[in-house]
């Protein structure tokens, strides 16, 4: 596996790959890799000739300096994992390579970034758009792969790609879960043993709510989920919203849209975990 640290070198390699007519799949990450990230690499390998992974903890998407400081990092282990799954190229830049000058760009995503994560983490998605667009400009991939666990982020990146006219296919890859159902996340390693044991309540409750919702209203389903999770000591639901799967705006009834998702953020102590469930997705 080739490791590249300079943006100029990465751009040169990307240009060479395009000249050789090799399709490139790109998996941008912030490191602390787990099976969820590796599933993105494996899917990229199926669809493309060359897989490029980036590891960069992006400071502009953190609105909490402590969250940035405490974000898990283990580059040595990450490199070994990427070698094991056959990643060909790792782009490993520092902040100066991504932001040689301060990035003051702002994006208008309409209402997509005004709700849920966008509401509770102001500026987060603008930072995501800054770094992903910068990485796209450097790597110039044919396809980019993102996990569906970060449901709202995936919608934002699709919209950013459309707005900026990138000729890049955005591929969503299903959430990878632990054996007990917890959605895989780099933040899981920050949980205490007790928190980790209790954290199964999030996915379990979302799965239960899928059947519960078949005979209950939107409001009843929301109350069911929030009450069940908040009854677990040390756990607090920041939000649980049932939304149109495309616009991310709240729905008031199950027949309001053919595509309905439930998105949640839960604090386990100080550790923030997100997940989602699809209640309805009619074939278009």
Image (cartoon, rainbow, N blue to C red):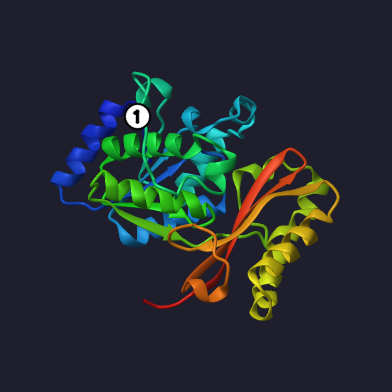
Percent across and percent down for residue 260 are: 52, 68
Relative height, residue 184 to residue 52 (above, below): below
Q: Quadrant of the N terminus?
A: top left
Measuring 41% from the left and 48% from the top, which residue is drawn there?
156
Q: Up-down: is 211 above or below 59? A: below
| Image position, residue 20 (x, y; %) | 15, 48
How crowded is the residue under tag 1: few (<14 C-alpha within 10 Å), some, or many (20+)? few
On-image quarter of the C terminus: bottom left
Q: Quadrant of residue 272?
A: top right
Res. 180 visible in picture: no
Residue at (59, 41) in percent of width and height: 120
Camera-side residue: 67 or 80?
67
In terms of image quadrants, where is residue 170?
bottom left
Seen in the image, is 130 located left or right of residue 239?
left
Q: Is residue 178 left or right of residue 7?
A: right
In this view, the residue farthest toward the bottom is 215
Query: Vertical placement of 211 versus 64: above or below?
Result: below
Residue under the point 39% across and 47% down:
110
Residue beneath disc 1? 105
- Residue 201 x/y as whole percent: 76, 60
């Amino acid at each position: 596996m080739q490791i590249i640290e300079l943006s100029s070198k990465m751009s040169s390699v990307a240009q060479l790959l395009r000249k050789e007519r090799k399709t490139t799949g790109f998996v941008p990450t912030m490191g602390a890799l787990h099976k969820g990230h590796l599933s993105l690499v494996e899917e990229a390998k199926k669809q493309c000739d060359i897989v490029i992974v980036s590891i960069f903890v992006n400071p502009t998407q953190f609105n909490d300096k402590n969250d940035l400081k405490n974000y898990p990092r283990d580059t040595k282990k990450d490199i070994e994992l990427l070698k094991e799954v056959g990643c060909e190229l790792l782009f490993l830049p520092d902040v100066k390579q991504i932001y040689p000058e301060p990035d003051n760009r702002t994006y208008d995503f309409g209402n997509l970034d005004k709700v849920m994560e966008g509401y509770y983490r102001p500026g987060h998605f603008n930072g995501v758009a800054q770094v992903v667009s910068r990485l796209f400009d450097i790597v110039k991939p044919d396809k980019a792969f993102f996990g569906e666990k970060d449901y709202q982020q995936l919608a934002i990146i699709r919209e950013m790609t459309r707005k900026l006219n990138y000729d890049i296919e955005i591929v969503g890859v299903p959430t990878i879960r632990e054996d007990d159902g917890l959605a895989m996340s780099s933040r899981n390693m920050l949980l205490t043993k007790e928190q980790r044991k209790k954290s199964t309540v999030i996915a379990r409750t979302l799965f239960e709510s899928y059947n519960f919702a078949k005979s209950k209203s939107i409001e009843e389903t929301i109350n069911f989920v929030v009450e069940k999770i908040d009854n677990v000591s040390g756990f607090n639901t920041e939000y649980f919203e049932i939304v149109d799967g495309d616009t991310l705006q709240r729905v008031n009834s199950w027949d309001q849209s053919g595509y309905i998702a439930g998105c949640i953020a839960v604090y386990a102590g100080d550790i923030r975990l997100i997940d989602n469930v699809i209640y309805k997705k009619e074939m278009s």
